[in-house]
Amino acid sequence: MTKDRILSAAKAVLESAGFEGLTIRKVAQRAGLSPMALYRHFKNKDELLNALMQDGISAWEAIVGGIRARDPVKWLEALSEAYLDFALAQPHKFDAAFFLPAPAARRFPDDFAAGRSPAIALAMARIDQAKADGQFRDEPTLGIAVALAAYGQGFVSMHRAKRFGSDKQFKALYRAAQHQFLDSLKPSGKSK
């Protein structure tokens, strides 16, 4: 199918040239089409960006759906680790999911409060469960979920900007910060 071929070509261009190099002309050339032929399948670059972003989000949601920890705090720890793995093992899908300036990208906080992100909805359910079990203080669930995502995204951004001395240092600091954040949510006297 031509639309799939175009999307594959767009992923390849994104992988080799980054966001800045992702042009309709380059994607069409990679797909073996003229730019006008590409426009028969994606009416504009925004539509192509939305398709790339959705592909990345779908990959992330599949990973999140596979987390099996039963304890809510362990589940959130596994989520943080999965986010790190996704950023490092599939950087271009990660970028498409979380950094691509796609017009249809979900917006904080409204889209997340409305449950339009299955991954955030699962995280919020675990946060609520941890609060109900007395593992977390009664803080706003959406705020916790957004902060957890922001911690991860901030660390990945710093890593991409070469702000850490090594990958080992980055991973250690990422894990320590995520653990510290989750630990800070526990009621007084319940730290690990």
Image (cartoon, rainbow, N blue to C red):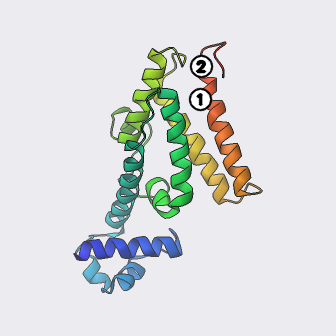
- Neighbor class of circle 1 (other Cα within 10 Å; few <14, some 14-19, many 20+) is some
Closer to us: 1 or 17:
1
Q: In the rendered structure, which amino acid carries the disc numbered 2?
A: Lys
- x%, y% of residue 155? 63, 48
- Are discs 2 and 1 less than 8 Å apart at CB? yes
Q: Image point 52% across, 20% down: which residue?
A: 139
Label 2 Cα neighbours within 10 Å, binned few <14 / some 14-19 / many ≥20:
some
- Element on which disc 2 rests: loop
Q: Secondary structure at mark 1?
A: helix
Q: Is residue 182 left or right of residue 132?
A: right
61 sits left or right of 187 in the view: left
Q: Quadrant of residue 113?
A: top left
* Residue lying at 47% horizontally and 15% vertically, measured from the top left: 133
Q: Disc 1 marks which amino acid?
A: Leu
24 versus 49 height, above or below: below
Mark number for residue 101? none
Residue 116 lies, with reference to residue 31, above or below; the image says above
Give the CA distance from mark 2 to mark 1: 7 Å
Q: Which residue is mark 1?
A: 182
Image spot of residue 60 (x, y percent): 42, 51
**In this orientation, which residue lies closer to the viewer: 79 or 99?**
79
Q: Which mark is residue 186?
A: 2
User: Residue 167, relative to residue 21: is it above or below?
Assistant: above
